[in-house]
Amino acid sequence: MAHLQTPAARTADVVIAGGGYVGLSLALALADAVPGVRVSVVDLRPPAESAGDPRASAIAAAARRMLETLGVWAALAPHAQPIVDMVVTDSRLDDVVRPVFLTFDGRTEAGEPFAHMVPNGRMVAAIAERAVARGVTVLAPDRVVDFQVESEGVTVSLGSGAQLRTRLLVAADGVRSRLRAFAGIRTSTWSYGQSGIVTTIAHERPHDGRAEEHFLPSGPFATLPLTGNRSSLVWTERTDVADRLVRGDDLVFEVELVRRLGHHLGAVRVEGPRTAYPLGLTLARDFVKPRFALVGDAAHGIHPIAGQGLNLGFRDVAALAEVLAETLRIGGDPGALDTLETYERWRRFDTFQMAAVTDVLNRLFSNDLAPVRIARDVGLGLVDRLPRLKRYFIGEAAGSGRGLPRLLTGAPI
């Protein structure tokens, strides 16, 4: 992307550290909502380098509406696979029969798919291209190495030696956020002793848009449909087992994969690299400080059991963009603490609720004790027989609910 700018801009209304989908979509949302706003995004990797990222993510219906409103979805739609239904099983690895305890129709009451699978690389590239077209400055490759907060602004020091003067610094630099530590924001953190193996598989038979989640004693094993006869794999194992599988022989990996997947998709082969990511829970105790805010994984890292990590980040974006846009339009200070605390109040309960739900689900289903297995299977069976409750869960997965930021409803800010 030759049109990305070099470190020439010395002032900005907002500087965002982190050029992933969260940082770039926040920049785009601000640029789209407030003509003339000066937004700079700083990242070590130019967005064009993300195009080859083989991973994919589930975009909830609410997040899709936001991307459509921001003018990005049209570029992603040809590569997006709707999830039209979902099945949940609970079994041991060597069980001959894997009974289905819960099924979901993957459409909301409005008739739209509750989620689409979208390649991460294409998503980042599409958001970046639109953001630059809207006037966002992307400084890459570069990084924020230090910052000083003063009463009227923030001085941001970059690795290139340049300095930026801004009214607000936003950290979107991931779950191990360096800027969060620089700001003195503490976290509640623990490890699950698990890692998530992520890769793409190609298979002989079509998936028909079905997502599958198998709860095994080591953790959830999920296949999520991609375009064509391909699926994204999220496979949870103890960290030592996951590391052996990722680093080991290709044949051994495929044999263990088929043991868990079964044969209903026909012959299977691994397509692309396989990577293991340590799984844990990280919650920032504060989302904001004067002239400083956290978004995305910098504010919260959760277990992928419900596939909601990315969508939590997009909810942060929609909420913070709305608060900042309303402030900037009336000539207010986007870095003022009372402004930022409005964002924090909006996002705190939802974040902590989702963290608690994923934590409980993981502990409940990564468990082979017979009484626990019986209780959860009875619970799944009851949910499967209650259509109204199932619709509620689909609505939650789609990101619906009251008090949503405007972008998540499909309305401009």
Image (cartoon, rainbow, N blue to C red):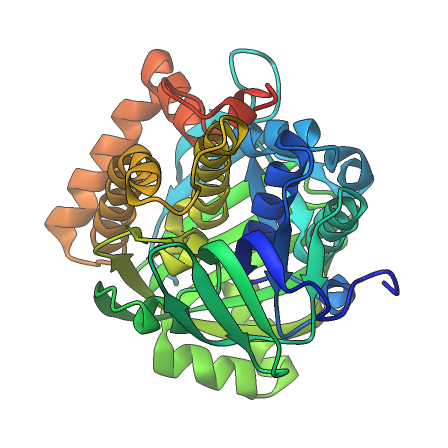
Residue 11 in sight: yes
Q: Tell me: residue 403, above or below residue 33.
A: above
Q: Residue at x 24, y 44 (%)?
A: 352
Q: Quadrant of residue 266?
A: bottom right
Where does the image place residue 254, in percent across and percent down from the top left? 61, 73
Where does the image place residue 195, in percent across and percent down from the top left? 40, 71
Where does the image place residue 74, in percent across and percent down from the top left? 80, 33
**366 left or right of 247?**
left
Q: Tell me: residue 77, above or below residue 138.
A: above
Which residue, as the protein is rendered here, is positioned at the far right?
A: 2
Of the 4 image quadrants, the one containing the C terminus is top right
Q: Quadrant of residue 190?
A: bottom left
Of the 4 image quadrants, the one containing the N terminus is bottom right
**183 left or right of 324?**
left
Nearest the eye: 78 or 404: 404
Which residue, as the protein is rendered here, is positioned at the far front?
A: 152
Q: Residue at x 55, y 88 (%)?
A: 248
Residue 106 in sight: no
Where does the image place residue 385, in percent across and percent down from the top left? 33, 18
